Amino acid sequence: MTTPTAPRLGTALARLLVLAAALLGALLAGAAPASAHAALTGSDPQDGAVVATAPKEVGLTFSEQVAMSADSIRVLDPSGRRADTGEIIDLCSGAVVKYGVALRAGLPDGTYTVAWQTVSADSHPIAGAFTFSIGAPSATSVALPEQAAGGGVVGALYGIARYLSYAGFAVLVGGGAFVLLCWPRGAGVRPVQQTVVRGWLTLTGATLVMLLLRGPYTGSGKLADVFDLAGLQAVLQTKTGAALTSRLLLLGAAALFVAVLFGAYARRTDPKERKDLAFGLGLGGTVVAAGIAGTWALAEHASTGIQPGIAMPVDILHLLAVATWLGGLTTLLVALYRAPSVERAAVERFSRVAFVSVAVLVATGIYQSWRQVGSWSALTGTRYGQLLLVKIGLMAVLVGIAWISRRWTQRLAERTPALPESEVEPESESDPEGAEKDLEGEGLADEGLEDQDSGDDRPGDAGADGEDAPEEIAPERAAQLARQRAAVATARRKKARDADPERTGLRRSVLTEAAVAVVLLAVTTVLTSTEPGRTEEEAARTGGTTAGSTAVPDRPVDFRLPFDTGGVDGEGVVRLSLDPGRTGANALHLFVERPNGKPLDVPEIKVNLTLEEKGVGPLPVAPDRIQTGHWSAGGVQLPLPGEWRIQVTVRTSEIDQTTIEKNVKIG
């Protein structure tokens, strides 16, 4: 009979691992600081507006509810001093989320900077700044921090902790489910125990780190503020702080579950008692796992936006399915490498469990995608949609590799007889006595070692009365012999394991699945901290249709428009000046800047002017490049007064461009 051979997966596996690592690096390197579900949809005065008299207050409108503090909105005069009273005003009305801050009386003319920072309802910090002018624009000495909200060292550490928390949750829940549903004997296998316990430790440690970093992450951004007890107390009063605290309490219950699973359950030999205990562990473990998953659902994207009552239970199901699949996959990988006697039946049972998990993932993922994206344009034209496409692609790859693993499972030869469930498989590296027993069962315990048990190792050959004395071996020598026997046992097991081509193929395919799963989890982590495509498009539409700035007669129109083309060096701000800002000929100046305020050189910039109420336009304007980041056009004709829409198209590469617009009133 011809023995089937394992395919040559070494080269393909290495390539896939390199690709996975490269993709993970690209995602992390290209990931912008966390933008969130909430977005600024309007302001009063608007960005770049020139008003004739000082307003009484500055108002900001958001797409969803935000958490405001006393210092969330700051208005700075041209010299950088506070121009507001520091009193936050709640201007919310119905579905409109609007907050403001009162301004001091007697403010002089000039350009004022509004800097704001808050936390959206889905737990992510958001911040921004814009300017408006009283009377006429002026120079300003205000220097805003370059670090975005949720960025810097604190943001990076918080992001790592988020990733580790997802990974720990998957291993904890998936490992426990794998033991109860697929391989009950695994409860007594030390590598499996260590894997699940490490998942619990990782999730607990990551949750504590997130709780300590939460204050500086949403506030100052300074790592030293981790030790600010007042800040920690404020965090505990927020929705996210309550969720993290609840997670820690539930992890205490999870520790009890792990202790019973690997203690009382692993030692049970009576089938009925074992079955009853498994039912109780399964029921209690499901409740605890759902509760831990709920701490994400209650504090992040699922709790805001449309249909939160449906979205939160769907999100919990999604997280449980991910954990059951990927965590079980991790435990199976450990079992295949560290416990070679894992039965074929256990692998087949996990294959069925993984199939159900994938089905749940697809169903819940379709709903979540519709809820967060909402349109085909948002799927391809927003960062959230693009990340979602990457995630879908990785899921397809993962399902394909899982299909290969399933084929290896069907071909797996049962060459190693299954051990009874009551027998605990010893770990040879840490249980030399168990290894010695294995060798004795094969008649190999003393093979190659008999010569080492004779000679000087014996204290004497005869007693005082001439009779043979009992053999004695020094403790150090006994330990040495035990280690040698354990090494022999390990080598024999590895040789037997590697001689099984089906098992080798299965190990390699499962390892490849795990590598892709690592990248998939990283994409998911970035996705949960990215502004949903539906919100981004809605904010863009609102920003484009909101009434523009009202120009003071015979005063220049000056405003700023942020843009993002999606490519390299694709983010920045266009500062536009139209002088004198009235009918007739005007001088147009455009300054293209990076987010840090430095000039950005772009290949092309175009302007269109439209007066829709009179049916005029679009009138194209092709400004000339003066120097890096500065474009200008003279004699720009505005024939009629009214509300003109100014559209600016910025191209940052051969294929990356975007169009931004603003409405301005020309007198």
Image (spheres, grey):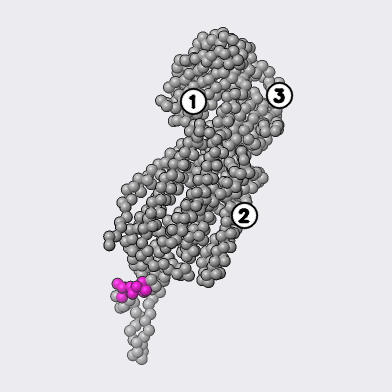
Identify the residue position indicated by label 2 in the image: 249
Q: Which residue extends farthest right?
A: 105
In front of the other: label 2 or label 3? 2
In the rendered view, does 58 fall on the left or right side of 446? right
Q: Is residue 444 magenta?
A: yes
Query: In this orientation, which residue lies closer to the viewer: 646 or 359?
Result: 359
Q: Residue 470 in the image: x percent, y percent? A: 37, 84
Query: Quarter of the image holding residue 555?
Result: top right
Q: Amino acid at mark 2?
A: Leu
Mark 3 Cα within 10 Å, few/some/many (few <14, many 20+)?
few
Left or right side of 540 for 408: left
Q: Is residue 526 above or below residue 430?
A: above
Residue 56 numbered tag: 3
Task: Give neighbour class at mark 1: few <14, some 14-19, many 20+ (Cα, 10 Å).
Answer: some
Magenta residues: mostly which secondary structure? loop
Along the polypeptide, which appears first: circle 2 or circle 3?
A: 3
Q: Secondary structure at mark 2?
A: helix
In the rendered structure, which disc, 1 or 2, sits on the residue that comes first in sequence? 2
Q: Quadrant of the N terminus?
A: bottom left
Query: Which contiguous range is marked in magenta?
Result: 439-450
